[in-house]
Image: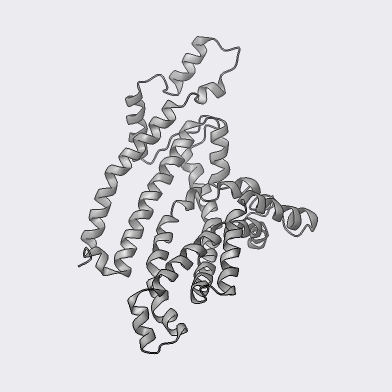
Amino acid sequence: MLRYIIKRILQAIPLLFVISFIVFSLIHLAPYDVIDSLKTPNMSPDQVALLREKYGLDEPFLVQYLTWLGNIFKGDFGYSLVSQRSIAGELGVRIPNTMKLIIPAYLTALVLAIALGLLAAANKGKWLDRLIDGIASLGIAIPTFWFAMILIYFLGYRFNLLPIIGMHTVGTTGDFQDFLVHFIMPYLTLTVAFFPELTRYIRSSAMQQTSEDYVTVQRAFHATKGQIFRRHISRNVLIPVVTQIGLALPMLVTGAIISETIFGWPGVGPYLTSATRSLDYPVIMAIMLLSATLVILGNLLSDILYSVVDPRIRKGGK
């Protein structure tokens, strides 16, 4: 197992360098940069040149890239060109806020999806299967921002049951009850956003299992449908679920951009949105690189969990 994990990590390292180069190149090739957002019509060319020199934008491309990469290795993501605050410090505060929202919503959606996906597969072609599939299809069709606005209108504005914006009321930071009432609407929005695709995925995986030979054998031994699903199919659906858990890792950073922005949740979403509007390229590069790294780590986590769930995978199918 340890050899397998080390091998996968060594394979991921060159990919991280390639991704960092691509991210930096894409930002460098953009038609505008932060200087365009900072300069005014009254600035002379010399003043603009001084700005570029101040932020290191007058250096050759490779020098800029190597400087940036060297700072990343030191844990220094640089400073926002707009607010002049440390990007690492900002992310250190905002990522936990995003995780407080993403993890409960995703786990709730996953548990619901497993239960309803298996229930739909056990009643394939029947009214219950069609109902669950219809709910999942409707959930996929509903835009996240639209559902969020509906919740804000009814729960926040019309009936005044929940606060509309923020993670805490001003002056009540640390109050769990206050956090909870702010948490409910974005939590419901993200749960509804995650739930439909997970349900369809697990339903499809479970239906594929029903046509496997081991199910036919169990039926020949007069096992009931409930026994087959509880003892066998639910366990074999675990591998597709593991895939989803690994692929969900990048969402810990960028999985709630729309919801966080709508509800004013102080996570990564509004930070990235604000940086994009102001062309704050160090912030954009840091978040893009972090997200890409989590994609690779998510795939690595999926592979490791695969080998735990099914040892045949790490043994090359032997």
Q: Position of residue 41 (x, y in %)?
A: 60, 14
Q: Quadrant of residue 223?
A: bottom left
What coloring was used for the rendering? one colour
Q: Position of residue 135 (x, y in %)?
A: 60, 64
155 up-or-down from 270: above or below = below
Q: Residue furthest right?
A: 158
Q: Position of residue 275 (x, y in %)?
A: 54, 35
> Left or right: 225 with respect to 194?
left
> Left or right: 147 with respect to 257?
right
Q: Position of residue 6 (x, y in %)?
A: 24, 55
275 up-or-down from 159: above or below = above
Give the residue at x 50% y 49%: 95
Foreground of the two, 232 or 17: 232
- The number of discs equals 0
Q: Quadrant of residue 215?
A: bottom left
Q: Residue furthest bottom?
A: 222
Q: In the rendered view of the protein, which quadrant contains the C terminus?
A: bottom left
Q: In the rendered view of the protein, which quadrant contains the N terminus?
A: bottom left
> Left or right: 69 with respect to 194?
left
Give the residue at x 59% y 74%: 127
Foreground of the two, 178 or 290: 290
Q: Quadrant of residue 77?
A: top left
93 up-or-down from 193: above or below = above
Foreground of the two, 143 or 150: 143
Foreground of the two, 235 or 66: 235
77 up-or-down from 104: above or below = above
Give the residue at x 53% y 40%: 272
